[in-house]
Image (spheres, rainbow, N blue to C red):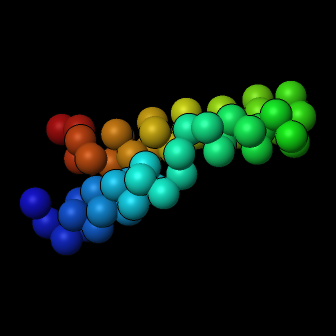
């Protein structure tokens, strides 16, 4: 595991442990429906991006 993958894993672990689900849901409901939709799209894009980067280049 190289340094960039290790740092990415560490970042995702820190993000998952500091942002609990209930706090995130409460914030989305306070902000509104459109904000929640945009936030979900951003999270899905970030997950897609991370998985794509972890797989490496396609040959």
Q: Is residue 57 visible?
A: no
Question: For this rendering, which residue is in front, 41 or 23?
Answer: 23
Image coords of residue 43 (percent x, y): 58, 39
- State the residue at coordinates (21%, 64%): 6
| On screen, residue 20 above or below 48 | below
Name the image quarter holding residue 26: top right
Image coords of residue 31 (percent x, y): 87, 42
Image coords of residue 35 (percent x, y): 83, 38
User: Which quarter of the image is occupied by the N terminus?
Assistant: bottom left
Q: Is residue 7 visible?
A: yes
Question: For this rendering, which residue is in front, 17 or 45?
Answer: 17
Q: Left or right: 59 with respect to 29?
A: left
Q: Left or right: 11 with respect to 24?
A: left
Q: Left or right: 29 with respect to 41?
A: right
Count of numbered labels shown in the rendering: 0
Image coords of residue 10 (percent x, y): 30, 62
Q: Left or right: 50 with respect to 3?
A: right
- State the residue at coordinates (39%, 60%): 14
Name the image quarter holding residue 27: top right
Question: For this rendering, which residue is in front, 7 or 21?
Answer: 21
User: Which quarter of the image is occupied by the C terminus?
Assistant: top left
| On screen, residue 20 above or below 36 | below
């Amino acid at each position: 595991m190289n340094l960039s993958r290790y740092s990415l894993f560490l970042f995702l672990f820190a993000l998952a442990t500091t942002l609990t689900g209930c706090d995130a849901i409460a914030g989305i409901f306070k902000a509104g429906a459109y904000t929640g939709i945009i936030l979900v799209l951003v999270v899905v894009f970030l997950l897609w991006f991370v998985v794509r980067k972890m797989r490496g280049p396609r040959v």
